[in-house]
Image: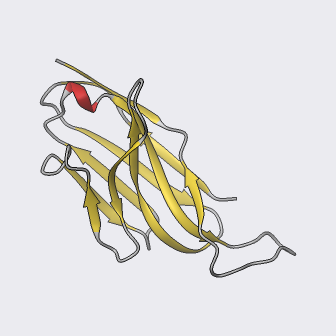
């Protein structure tokens, strides 16, 4: 069973730094994308940063230059370093991946399958 396990987050003052961690476990053939989304109260979930299918890291305009995504898909682990935090960064942050899981014993497998997984979410609250 594939799981995305997150840690980190909590409360911070504006201008401070926080770090989020995500690791992927389970039987996996290939990870296509791995990154972070966030959802603020009353708003839609949005991409924060992600390693895409080509291995390139993409950032939302709102965090470009302040957030850094490190790690890689092969190690199944990523770290989001959030610098110069702003109150508008307050949200629940979700680790996200699109991957090709291996089936359980006796199950069928299609190497073209792309399945989306989400972590449980971790709250980041930034006060001014």
Is 92 above or below relative to 24?
above
Is 123 above or below relative to 2?
above
Residue 68 lies, in percent from the top left, at 22, 53
Q: Nearer the viewer, residue 52 or 17?
A: 52
Image color mode:
secondary structure
Quadrant where the image shows the C terminus: top left
Question: Residue at left 31%, top 28%?
Answer: 90
Question: Residue at left 48%, top 71%?
Answer: 32
Left or right, 126 with reference to 115: left
Q: Nearer the viewer, residue 109 or 82?
A: 109
Is 113 above or below relative to 37?
below
Left or right, 101 with reference to 57: right
Residue sitting at the far right: 106
Quarter where residue 107 is shown: bottom right
Question: Residue at left 15%, top 46%?
Answer: 66
Quarter where residue 109 is shown: bottom right
Residue 61 lies, in percent from the top left, at 20, 49
């Amino acid at each position: 069973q594939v799981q995305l396990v997150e840690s980190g987050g909590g409360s911070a003052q504006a201008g401070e730094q926080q770090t989020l961690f995500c690791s992927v476990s389970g039987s996996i053939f290939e990870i296509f994308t791995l990154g972070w989304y966030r959802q603020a109260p009353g708003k839609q979930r949005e991409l924060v940063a992600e390693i895409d299918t080509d291995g390139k890291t993409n950032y939302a305009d709102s965090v470009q230059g302040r957030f850094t995504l490190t790690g890689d898909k092969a190690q199944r682990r990523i770290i989001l370093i959030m610098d110069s935090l702003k109150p508008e960064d307050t949200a629940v942050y979700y680790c996200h991946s699109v991957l090709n899981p291996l089936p359980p014993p006796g199950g069928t497998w299609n190497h073209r399958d792309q399945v989306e997984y989400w972590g449980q979410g971790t709250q980041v609250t930034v006060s001014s």
